[in-house]
Image: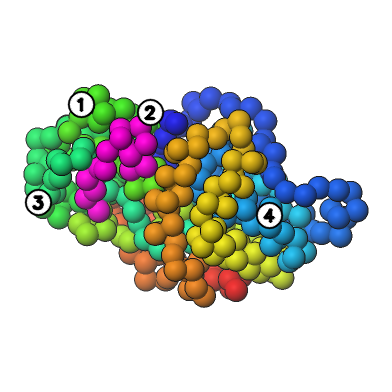
């Protein structure tokens, strides 16, 4: 399975159109649908991946229907379209990235983060099993990286913690997947996250990769993935937004506590886009980032947002960030 940088705000302008929206799983029926409020939930990627398991199994179990929601899980035509759908109101809520929220707000889009997915930034440097590196040891090494601004900024912050700069390493850019570069020994290490590139190293590379966590070396501990809402829709439908987040929290909890059932529901829903080994391992790698699921699991932190915005401004990614409070809200959380 081809993987990618999750922070896609400045890349993939020439992304290939991957086709029609992926149909969502779950019960259908005119009578049942008429009693429920439709909520259109746009995803971060055109092809279904294991990150979606909670709402896939949650819809299958009826958690959204119990909250009065007919959840329409759709995939964007291209990775560049998620925030376009949300900002223009073609979607009510989105599964997206923190940087896509920031870039959308910079362009004046009426979007707002409404919950986090995962409790920490799990991005870092990945190397082959048995070949760990310290940050200082990266000097002179060749690193596979994606061509998005935040990946480069995070790498720059990591290197700075050891008195190094981007010019002290040799970067090889991958369009959509850094893992083959490492497996083919074309680079010494790659950038990525534990539950995407790390997962692929386990499933494709048949090894346990070494991981150098960015958050231990000067990078803000901001969860990469999150939920966002169209601000006009949120204002007009506050109780429905809260119902969506309640069902989503319940779905995440259930998927974490019943991983095999979650993977099975995903396989049933997306059999044509289903790499069983990868999805099973990806969910196993994702669960530690979500568990334990409690009342604070989806809650976002003002100090963390401020730290992130300070970092992206210092790196020249966003020239004049808005006040942190304008990017997110916790008011729709359970």
What is the crowding at mark 4: few (fewer than 14 residues within 10 Å), some, or many (at least 20)?
A: many
Q: Is residue 190 left or right of residue 284?
A: left
Q: Is residue 74 left or right of residue 134?
A: right
> Looking at this view, is 322 or 223 the one in front?
223
User: Extreme right residue here?
Assistant: 31
> Looking at this view, is 270 or 123 the one in front?
270
Quick check: marks 3 and 4 in contact, CB under 8 Å?
Answer: no
Give the label, 2 or 1, closer to the camera: 1
Q: Circle 4 sits on which residue?
A: 59
Label placed on residue 163: 3
Q: CA distance from mark 3 to mark 1?
A: 27 Å
Q: Position of residue 285 (x, y in %)?
A: 39, 51
Q: Position of residue 293 (x, y in %)?
A: 49, 68
Give the label, 2 or 3, closer to the camera: 2
What is the crowding at mark 2: few (fewer than 14 residues within 10 Å), some, or many (at least 20)?
A: some
Residue 54 sits above or below residue 236 on the image: above
The stretch drawn in magenta includes residue 252: no
Quick check: marks 3 and 1 in contact, CB under 8 Å?
Answer: no
- Residue 197 visible in image: no
Lower sequence index among marks 3 and 1: 3
Q: Circle 2 sits on which residue?
A: 175
Q: Circle 1 sits on which residue?
A: 185
Image quadrant occupied by the N terminus: top left
Badge 1 element: loop
**Which segment did they paint magenta?**
197-213
Residue 252 sits above or below residue 78 on the image: below
Residue at x 12% of width, y 49% of height: 134
Q: How many marks?
A: 4
Residue 305 sits above or below residue 161 on the image: below
Q: CA distance from mark 3 to mark 4?
A: 49 Å
Give the label, 3 or 1, closer to the camera: 1
Badge 4 element: helix
């Amino acid at each position: 399975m081809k993987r990618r940088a999750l922070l896609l705000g400045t890349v993939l302008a020439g992304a290939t159109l991957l086709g029609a929206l992926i149909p969502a799983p779950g019960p259908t029926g005119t009578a049942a649908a008429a009693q429920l409020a439709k909520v259109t939930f746009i995803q971060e990627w055109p092809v279904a991946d294991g990150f979606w398991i909670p709402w896939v199994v949650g819809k299958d179990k009826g958690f959204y229907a119990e909250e009065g929601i007919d959840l329409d899980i759709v995939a964007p035509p291209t990775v560049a379209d998620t925030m376009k759908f949300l900002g223009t109101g073609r979607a009510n809520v989105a599964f997206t990235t923190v940087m896509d929220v920031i870039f959308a707000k910079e362009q004046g889009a009426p979007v707002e983060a409404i919950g986090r997915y995962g409790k920490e930034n799990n991005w870092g440097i990945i190397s082959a099993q048995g070949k760990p590196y310290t940050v200082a040891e990266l000097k002179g090494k060749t690193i596979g990286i994606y061509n998005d601004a935040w990946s480069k900024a995070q790498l720059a912050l990591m290197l700075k913690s050891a008195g190094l700069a981007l010019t002290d390493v040799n970067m090889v850019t991958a369009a959509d997947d850094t893992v083959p570069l490492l497996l083919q020994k074309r680079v010494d290490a790659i950038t990525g996250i534990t539950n995407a590139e790390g997962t692929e190293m386990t499933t494709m590379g048949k090894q346990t990769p070494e991981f150098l966590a960015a958050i231990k070396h000067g990078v803000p501990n901001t969860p990469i993935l999150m939920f966002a809402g169209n601000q006009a829709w949120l204002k007009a439908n506050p109780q429905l937004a809260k119902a969506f987040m309640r069902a989503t929290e319940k779905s995440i909890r259930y998927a974490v506590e019943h991983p095999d059932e979650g993977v099975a529901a995903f396989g049933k829903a997306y059999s044509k886009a289903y790499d069983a080994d990868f999805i099973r391992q990806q969910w196993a790698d994702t669960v530690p980032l979500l568990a334990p699921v409690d009342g604070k699991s989806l809650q976002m932190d003002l100090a963390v947002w401020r730290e992130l915005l300070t970092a992206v401004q210092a790196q020249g990614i966003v020239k004049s960030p808005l006040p942190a409070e304008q990017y997110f809200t916790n008011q729709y959380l359970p």
